[in-house]
Amino acid sequence: MSRPTKQSPERGDARTRLLEAARDIIRAKGFAATTVDDLCRAAAVTKGAFFHNFGSKDALGVAAAEFWAETTSVFFATAPYHDPVDALERVLAYVAFRKAIITGDLPEFTCLVGTMAQEIYASSRDIRDACGRSIFGHAATLEADIETARRDHGITGDWTAESLARHTQAVIQGGFVLAKAGNNPELARESLDHLDRYIRHLFHVAEEDET
């Protein structure tokens, strides 16, 4: 998941400003390299305010993952890929939308929870689990459309709507890793193009068809 980004540090209460700062700085520097001082400076709050709201940096990490899930859920719920009448069109429109929002600098379009999960999966179970809830929760929002598309197109096989929904996130998160490794957003867009082709193949739909 990705997108919500950068707001003025003067907006919102101290907790919200710290969460917004975490969202932006962790995507740019990683969780371990992000210090409490970094967060307080960006949010224009004192260390006292930080520890009053979160108690520890790990607690901030859990809250940041939950904040990310909440804000991105609103962002994706109102996105235009929900508009097509046909379920498969909606699934393909989702992939196209994910490609379209790969814009700006790398930290602006990459995923906070994906970034944290890769870094802390073995060192902080609480943060890892919060990241997992966010990623798998977002994947679950695609399942109904995929299942309807399977039914409408008479698709059978040894895969499920749930597994394909999870695969979309594997491709997206992997695309972000490639974009970071190559310092090139086009590598993430390329991954989405291949995901589009793969889904069309599963549903026996040619690329030139207007599904």
Image (tube, rainbow, N blue to C red):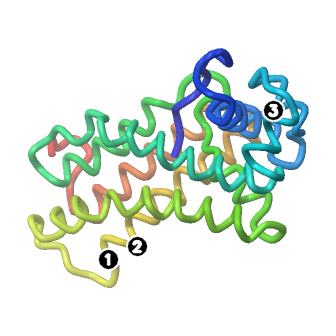
Q: Residue at x 44, y 61 (%)?
A: 137
Asked whether the beta carbons under mark 2 and mark 1 sit within 8 Å of each other, the answer is yes
Q: Which residue is mark 3?
A: 39
89 to 14, vertically: above or below? below
| Tag shown at residue 160 | 1
Density class for disc 2 (Cα within 10 Å; few <14, some 14-19, many ≥20) is few
Q: Which residue is mark 2?
A: 163
Q: Nearer the viewer, residue 180 or 136?
A: 136
Identify which amino acid the numbered label 3 is placed on.
Leu
| Tag shown at residue 97 | none
Please tell me whether mark 2 sits on a helix, a strand or a loop. Answer: helix
Density class for disc 3 (Cα within 10 Å; few <14, some 14-19, many ≥20) is many
Q: Residue at x 68, y 30 (%)?
A: 14
Label 1 or label 3, whichever lies nearer to me, is: 3
Please tell me whether mark 1 sits on a helix, a strand or a loop. Answer: loop
Instruction: Kindly report the distance in space between the C-alpha atoms of the residues bearing marks 3 and 2.
Output: 37 Å
